[in-house]
Image (cartoon, grey):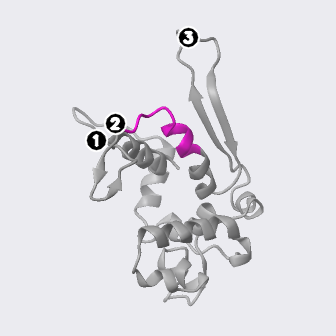
């Protein structure tokens, strides 16, 4: 049902509603056969360092890798079945290229900065094809999105603010899209 009337859903929409109605989200599903060896160490370490910088004093910063992964939802144990392991979210967020392609054979993140139609016959001005994990994609795309934004001089206490509302909106949109 949408506003003024009833409509038939496509098979894809029905499948998505059924999947979303599940008690367990698709991201929290334990993926059998995957271990911490399927996690890209550089991505995971960079994420942990960013987490530590933004969350000083949080006890999670002192956790070992597996406990930290569990604390952020990347590793879990199913109390009903006793199965435990990395979640789909952990592989998507931090997985090695090999692990990603085993999980999703057609895994590809294709970022295109479209050209202004009046200025060029080019279809895009900038393109980035990323076959890596979502964290790597974010690290590569976000600076390209925000490069043209101006950052006015603004202080918050003794610190200079380098993010504007536009930066935040682009960051949230990118995270939601990824």
x and y percentages locating residue 123 in the rendered image: 63, 20
Circle 2 SS class: loop
For the residues labelled 2 and 1, say whether their Cβ atoms are less than 8 Å apart. yes
Circle 1 SS class: loop
Is 29 positioned to the left or the right of 156 in the image?
A: right
Front-most of 33 and 130? 130
For the residues labelled 2 and 3, say whether their Cβ atoms are less than 8 Å apart. no
x and y percentages locating residue 171 in the rendered image: 44, 47
Residue designated by label 2: 7
Circle 3 SS class: loop
Front-most of 165 and 104? 165
Q: Residue at x 27, y 38 (%)?
A: 2
Q: Is residue 147 above or below residue 47?
A: above
Q: Earlier in the sequence, mark 2 or mark 3?
A: 2
Foreground mark, 1 or 3, reads 3
What is the C-alpha distance between the residues marked 2 and 1?
Answer: 6 Å
Residue designated by label 1: 1
Asked whether the viewer can see residue 17, the reply is yes
What is the C-alpha distance between the residues marked 1 and 3?
Answer: 42 Å
Q: Residues within 10 Å of mark 1 (few under 14, many from 20)?
A: few
Which mark, residue 140?
Answer: none
What is the C-alpha distance between the residues marked 2 and 3?
Answer: 40 Å
Front-most of 90 and 84? 90
Q: Earlier in the sequence, mark 2 or mark 1?
A: 1
Determine if the magenta segment contains residue 31: no
| Residue span colored magenta | 141-151
Q: Residue at x 43, y 59 (%)?
A: 20
Asked whether the viewer can see residue 33, the reply is no
Which mark, residue 119?
Answer: 3
Residue furthest toward the left?
4
């Amino acid at each position: 049902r949408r506003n003024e009337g009833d409509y038939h859903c496509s098979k894809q929409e029905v499948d998505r509603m059924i999947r979303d109605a599940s008690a367990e989200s698709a991201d929290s599903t334990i993926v059998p056969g995957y271990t911490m060896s399927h996690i890209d160490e550089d991505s995971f370490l960079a994420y942990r360092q960013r987490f530590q910088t933004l969350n000083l004093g949080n006890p999670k910063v002192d956790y070992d890798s597996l406990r930290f992964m569990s604390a952020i939802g990347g590793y879990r144990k199913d109390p009903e079945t006793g199965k435990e392991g990395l979640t789909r979210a952990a592989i998507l967020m931090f997985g090695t290229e090999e692990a990603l392609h085993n999980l999703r054979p057609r895994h590809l993140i294709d970022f295109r900065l479209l050209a202004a139609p009046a200025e060029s016959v080019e279809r895009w001005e900038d393109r980035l094809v990323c076959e890596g994990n979502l964290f790597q994609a974010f690290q590569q795309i976000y600076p390209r999105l925000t490069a043209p934004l101006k950052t006015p001089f603004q202080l918050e206490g003794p610190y200079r603010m380098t993010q504007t509302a536009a930066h935040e909106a682009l960051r949230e949109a990118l995270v939601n899209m990824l």
